[in-house]
Image: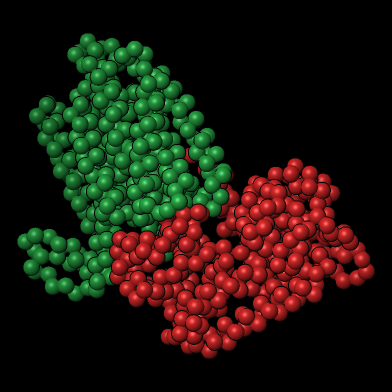
Amino acid sequence: MNYLEKILHWKLIITYLIVVLVLTIVITATLGPAHIHPLIVLKMLASRLPLVNSLVAPSWSISEETIIFQIRLPRIILGVLVGAALGVAGTAMQGLFKNPMADPYIIGISAGAALGATLAMVTLASLSMYMVPLMAFIFAMGAIFLVYNIARVGSKLPTSTLLLSGIAVTLFLSAITSFMMYISGEKLHGIVFWLMGGLWASSWDDVWMTFPWIVIGTTIIYIFARDLNVMLLDEEPAQHLGVDVERLKKIIMTFTSLITASAVAVSGIIGFVGLIIPHAMRILVGPDHRILLPCSALVGGVFLVWADTLARTIIAPTEIPVGIITSIFGAPFFIYLLRKRKKAIF
Amino acid sequence: MRRNTGTILVIAFIIASNGCITLTPSVGESPLIITDDLGREVTIPKELNRIVSLSPSNTEILFSLGLGDKVVGVTSYCNYPPEAQERLEIGGFVTVNIEKVVALRPDLVLADSRLQKAVVEELEKLDLSVVALRSDDMDEILEDIELIGKITGREGASQELTANMRKRIKAITDNTKDLNEDQLPHVLFIHQLDPLSVSGPGSLAHILIQLAGGLNIAADVEAKSVVYNLELLIERDPDVIIFNKNMGTIEITVNDLKGQPGWNVISAVKNDRVYGIDGDVVSRKGPRIVDGLEEMARCIHPELFE
């Protein structure tokens, strides 16, 4: 395949995935435990679109409108954002560290966010909608900062030291979180559910809080897709090929941390997506980050939205933490891909 | 996520374990031998001067029977009556410090049969008299109070207390039992807001809602406490929302609830029928449960009980 063919092929894949994403949003908007006919939902969506809105006469109640536009839709959009962020962050971390076990949480983000959220829940005396995500975000970034400074040797950032300091900081922060949980008494309930991860109380506020960070972070990571490709050769050859390896590490780390922390702040710790989606995409579209990053973003979003659709409908009126669904359905699928491929993927 | 597994297991266990209470005090000469809710035969010492309570419900029952000065140890959750907090703390609820209990040299330990099985076994090995109790509905609460009265030689006081409780329960149910279906407001009891967690069948709050003449809109869930879907909250449109106003120690106000995105279309919110109550009163299996019932009744049927 020559270069032009490859570009065309990539464009096709991305167009196809964007169509899948749009269809996913529309279809999952019609699915939910509340009994609203899918046609009514489609009409409602059409009524908010320019050009076609004049063709639709409202034939639904105010509570149906509230359910779709204030409960279901922000949850779906947030699912897309969080899934995309985790997919991109996982891909970037795996590429940067050349380590198949790397995920967005590998350098302490989840442990930092968990501690921040737990502290907020244990110490706050009054309810504030934004304190938990805010504290989660601040502590996640704090954890990264700590890991980075522990691992730094002069101006360099040796990969193995970085991974090990990530593990050490994670263990340390997790121990504090466990202690906080142990003494949290009646608040344990909220903490446990936060740690399991879920999109149950998503609002447009959550969407607007995360949207700019995830879009900016993802875009900047994508700009460095070529450099990530060169990194696959190893650090030294990359350096010889003109990549400023240390600078790249800092940039990628900063922006994966930013998008992961934003995602974790609003959704808790959703496992699996950031680890497995990049691998699945690498099997399907190959290791080139220029196609791998957008595919991981789109498929991460689609996957999380479908997982969350199951989470909110499968045993309605009860909710299941979405992290349970992502692993139960995602892991067997990934094993299938691994077996089918039957050769080393990294 | 390994560190969470234990907690999740505990929660799963609370949800899964749904045994049944059988209290058969064997009548006869002293010493008194009773069979507790774990099916253990326990010989009750004649002289009870030092009692350790391993649950807030037990503590409240003991104090209400006038045994407060014999209670020497309580859990960190035992916050009622206020003087209970002056007793030595022997740990949390599932995290009982066995050494502290033993050091108190109790004549009797009152435990919870559902969550404290392991603790009971430990204490039994150390030759302590441990009675494990469990109650799941109003009748069982009344039976437990009478049983504790019997064990502690306060039968008179316990029967007086339960007679009064029965009278107050009847005063409510006399007003609510003949209401027909469309006179029953649709009610939701929220015990945690994030994530939205509500009380389902089998929970005390559910039982209280029924006795107080309401229909729990979460009557179709599979467990006593579940995370509830927000769409269904709006679709099922409760007439009355009652919430635990101190979730943990976080104070929740009516306006916090009303301000949740999308909640403005719910009847309870539109009609100002959102009430915060002390969650302990509707969840502890002691004498105050009747206060909880009366408060719920006032929320659900203000026209009958104000």
Q: Colour of chain A?
A: green
Residue A195 percent coordinates (x, y): 45, 45
User: Residue, x 87% and y 71% (percent of image)?
Assistant: B27
- Give the answer, above or below, for where A306 lies relative to A225: below
Residue A213 percent coordinates (x, y): 24, 39
- Give the answer, above or below, for where B235 lies relative to B122: below
Residue lying at the far right of the rendered structure: B29
User: Residue, x 60% and y 84% (percent of image)?
Assistant: B171
User: Residue, x 35% and y 37% (percent of image)?
Assistant: A138
- Give the answer, above or below, for where B107 lies relative to B20: above
Q: Quadrant of the N terminus of chain A?
A: top left
Between A266 and B175, the one nearer to me in the picture: B175
Q: Quadrant of the C terminus of chain A?
A: top left
Residue B187 percent coordinates (x, y): 44, 74
In the image: residue A241, left or right of residue A328: left
Q: Which chain is red?
A: B
